[in-house]
Image (cartoon, rainbow, N blue to C red):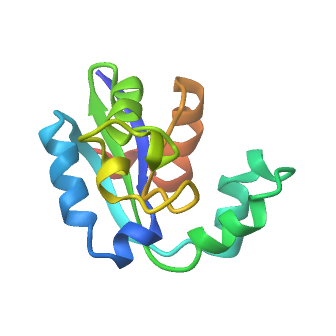
């Protein structure tokens, strides 16, 4: 079994879509090993997305991720990282496959409702950023 990290972003939480997204996650065969709702501080968002610091969208990304609560998750399944990327759909919902979370719920490339680790190395950093080992079941 592999674990990956996921976020239901502020746009989806504000739109009341968290429950539908969680249902989709479970229907796709993931076990939720950890989950909590929180509001990211400016420092948390800047640190978490620090890899994008030099990109032109960094400021708007930090602003967006701190505008309201998020749901952070640890998902578990065989091949969880690739499976979650497929379940989310393309970053740009216009390019996302039918039935994917982003196709169903995202409103644009920047407000794309969910985040997911893109590699095992990324998941290994992202999971402990939000969860202590004792919080995972």
Question: Does residue 84 appear to the left or right of 28 in the view shown?
Answer: right
Picture quadrant of residue 11: bottom left
Residue 117 in the image: state x and y as whole percent: 51, 37
Which residue corresponds to the image point at 41% horizontal and 33% vertical from the top-left? 85
Which residue corresponds to the image point at 44% horizontal and 42% vertical from the top-left? 5
Seen in the picture, residue 89 relative to 62 is either above or below; the reply is above
Which residue corresponds to the image point at 56% horizontal and 79% vertical from the top-left? 67
Residue 8 seen in this snapshot: yes
Q: Which of 137 and 60 is in front in this view?
A: 60
Q: Which of 137 and 22 is in front in this view?
A: 22
Seen in the picture, residue 124 relative to 136 is either above or below; the reply is above
Residue 115 seen in this snapshot: no
Q: Quick one: quadrant of the C terminus?
A: top left
Residue 116 in the image: state x and y as whole percent: 47, 42
Seen in the picture, residue 95 relative to 19 is either above or below; the reply is above
Q: Nearer the viewer, residue 34 or 61?
A: 61
Q: Quick one: quadrant of the N terminus?
A: top left
Question: Does residue 63 appear to the left or right of 27 in the view shown?
Answer: right
Residue 34 in the image: state x and y as whole percent: 31, 50
Picture quadrant of residue 105: bottom left
């Amino acid at each position: 079994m592999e674990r990956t990290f996921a976020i239901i972003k502020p746009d989806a939480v504000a739109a009341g879509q968290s429950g539908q997204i969680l249902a989709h996650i479970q229907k796709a065969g993931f076990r939720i090993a950890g989950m909590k709702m929180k509001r990211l501080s400016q420092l948390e968002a800047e640190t978490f997305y620090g890899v994008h610091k030099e990109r032109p969208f960094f400021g708007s990304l930090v602003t967006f991720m701190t505008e309201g609560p998020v749901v952070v998750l640890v998902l578990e399944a065989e091949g969880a990282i690739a499976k979650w990327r497929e379940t989310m759909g393309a970053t740009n919902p216009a390019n996302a496959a039918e039935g994917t979370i982003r196709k169903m719920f995202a409103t644009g490339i920047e407000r794309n409702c969910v985040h997911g680790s893109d590699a095992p190395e990324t998941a290994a950093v992202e999971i402990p950023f939000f969860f202590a080992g004792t919080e995972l079941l």
